[in-house]
Structures are given as structure tokens and as C-alpha cells.
Image (cartoon, grey):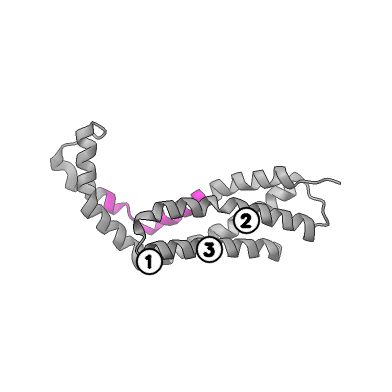
Amino acid sequence: MKSKLFLFAIIYSALSILSICIAFYGGYIHLLNYVYLFSLLGLLPFVLLAVKTFRDKENGGVLSGKEAFKAGLKCVVSSAIILSVFQAVFFTLDFKEYKISYMRTIGPEAIKKEISRGLLKAKESEIPAIINNDIEQVTLFYEITGVLFKTIAYGLFCSFIAAVFFKRTS
């Protein structure tokens, strides 16, 4: 892999990690879902820049669609690995406890609302069992899988867009 592709992956991952840490530790936890969304959407410009730089500086200005897609995907996979390692550390240190605490405090009221609206077919006596089932599913495996799947799925789209825009055969 080319070093410039890694550089864009590292810069994107560092900015994404920084924004997540600021939101979580800076008291803006209510905005954490938006931070995750915008950091994921922020992947597109980095993939576009990585493929453009790869085409212009490292590949002599000529790049097929397949090569452009591969270059974008290398940047995406590198970012996904970095973000997965971060998520593993973040989840183990702080996020798991926060998530479980959130489920225990907010969960019962949310489930009651869903039952009253008819969105959930359960009795109020089943709420503790539902909460416990949800808490059992808070695992490192699910966190890592979620990060990898979202990043790579959206990264495939970004790589395709970059390949369409930056392919040049002559």
C-alpha cells in the first residue's frame, strides 16, 4: 500500500477519534450519535482526496476505475482497522459501563412508551427481562462488528464514487 493512502486514513481516523472523545468526555454525550454519523460521513472527502492524490502524484495521472476503487478501499480498510482498535479500547475502558447504565435508567421508560404506542407487544412485567436481555448483548464483539460493518459498507460506496470521479485512462 502507498504511504499517502495510509496518511489519509490516519488523519481521518484521528479526527474521528478526537470528535468522539470530545463528545463523550467533554459532556456532550447527548450528541454522540450525531458525532458518529458525521464522522462516518466525513470519510467521503478523505477517500476522494486519497484517490486523487494517488492518481496525480503516485500513479502518473493515469488510473483505471479498478485501481481507483482499490486505492479507495485500501484507505477505508486502514481507517476501519484503526477505528476498530480505538473502539475496542474505548468500549473496554468507559463506553460499556455507560451503555449499561443508560439502558438501566432510560430503558424502562422507553419500553413503556413503545408498549403504550403499540410498537412493542409485551407486558410491563416483562420489562426487566427485556432490559437484561439487551444488557447481555452489550459485548465487545458487537461493538467491533458494528464499527467494521458501517465503515466498510460506507467505504465501499465512497470508493465507488472516487473511482467514478477520478479514473483517467490516458
For marks 1 and 2 on the same chain, the one whose residue lies earlier in the sequence: 1
- 164 relative to 53, above or below: above
Residue 148 visible somewhere in the drawing: no
Q: Is residue 167 magenta?
A: no
**Amino acid type of disc 1?**
Gly
Q: Nearer the viewer, residue 2 or 140?
A: 2
- 161 relative to 25, above or below: above
The span from disc 1 to disc 2 (Cα, nearest Å) is 26 Å
**Residue of label 2:** 46
Asked whether, in this view, residue 60 is left or right of residue 91, the answer is right
Residue at x 65%, y 44% (from the top left corner): 160
Asked whether, in this view, residue 68 is left or right of residue 117, the answer is right
Q: Is disc 2 surrounded by few (<14), some (14 to 19) or many (20+) residues within 10 Å?
A: many
Say if mark 1 contacts mark 3, CB within 8 Å.
no
Q: Which range of residues does the magenta coloring cover? A: 134-151
Residue at x 53%, y 63% (from the top left corner): 15
Q: Is disc 1 surrounded by few (<14), some (14 to 19) or many (20+) residues within 10 Å?
A: few
Residue 56 x %, y %: 78, 56
Residue 146 x %, y %: 44, 51
Residue 65: quarter of image:
top right
For marks 3 and 2 on the same chain, the one whose residue lies earlier in the sequence: 3
Asked whether, in this view, residue 28 is left or right of residue 37, the answer is left
- On residue 26, the disc is 1
**Residue of label 3:** 15
**Amino acid type of disc 2?**
Phe
**Amino acid type of disc 3?**
Leu
Q: Is residue 137 magenta?
A: yes
For marks 1 and 3 on the same chain, the one whose residue lies earlier in the sequence: 3
